[in-house]
Amino acid sequence: MPWKEKLIIALDVSDPDYALELVDKFGDQIEIYKVGLELYTSAGPKIIEEIHKRKKRVFLDLKFHDIPNTVLKASVAAARLGVFMFNVHASGGLDMMKRCREAVTEVCLKENLRRPRIFGITVLTSLSEEILKQELGIQHGLNAHVRHLSGLALKAGLDGVVASGHEVSKIKHHCGESFLIITPGIRPSWQPPDDQMRTMTPKQAIKEGADYIVMGRSILNHTDPLKAIELISVEMLTA
């Protein structure tokens, strides 16, 4: 897979006009854009339509987590928006993920839609093992928890998971090489980790086996975002 198809730019902004300005600025350099809670709440589904008009693909990052019936209905709505991929929290349970995948597959077949890829969120990169144990009461360790949730996502028939680069090789070993992994918390050498705890460089993540990497602030806040993308592409190509 070419580097352009592996790099997802996070449009973590609230102004839809600015978001589209970024899409236009990056042009042929970027193929996939992440629309998360901030932008979707500000702009609604219209922003997805506008990105599609520019022949780009959308990763809808709303992290669905609710009772199975609510999640499957939201997932069907996402499929009808034509997004390339979206995610649900794997901690919502096997039944929630399985019913989500089944409902999306059914509606896409019935309405002749391209089925979006569905990913399960494992453990957010802002969480550490200490937080997992002391605040969330999960005692079996971060790696074991990620492995368990990844196995549930695989059993539910999801296409892959969202996980830190530090867990990628373990997940691939447990779930197979064809099980896709989106890796957030990616920071080039010039960028501090901010509120992310389990970070990794683009080169490291690709070497570990990540299928997609998500980057936002380190590119959008750079004095020359196009130059930042160029430098990141070099890191990815040398992995």
Image: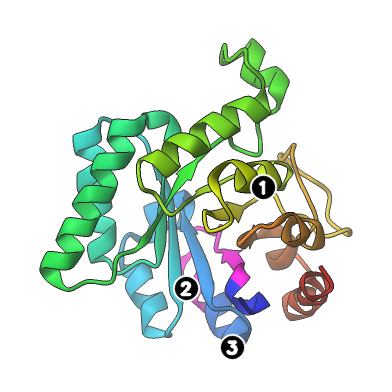
Label placed on residue 135 = none
Q: Are marks 1 and 2 in contact (CB under 8 Å)?
A: no
- Asked if residue 5 is positioned above or below residue 174 in the image, the reply reads below
Q: Which residue is mark 2?
A: 17
Q: Using residue 220 as the reference point, say whether residue 180 is left or right of it.
A: left
Q: What crowding class fits label 1: few (fewer than 14 Cα within 10 Å), some (14-19), or many (20 or more)?
A: many
Residue 28: give its label: 3
Amino acid residing under circle 2: Asp
**Residue 59 rendering spot, x and y as whole percentages:** 45, 62
Image color mode: rainbow
Residue shown at the point (49%, 36%) measured from the top left:
151
What amino acid does circle 1 point to? Val
Closer to the eye: label 1 or 2:
1
Instruction: Give the Cα separation between the discs numbered 1 and 3.
Output: 28 Å
Determine which quarter of the picture holds residue 230: bottom right
Left or right, 91 with respect to 146, comes to left
Q: Residues within 10 Å of mark 2 (few under 14, many from 20)?
A: few
Check disc 1 and report the residue beneath it: 168
Quote the CA–CA distance across marks 3 and 2: 19 Å
Q: Is residue 204 above or below residue 168?
A: below
What span is colored magenta in the figure?
6-20
Mark 3 residue type: Asp
If the image is split into quadrants, where does the N terminus sit?
bottom right
- Is disc 3 surrounded by few (<14), some (14 to 19) or many (20+) residues within 10 Å? few
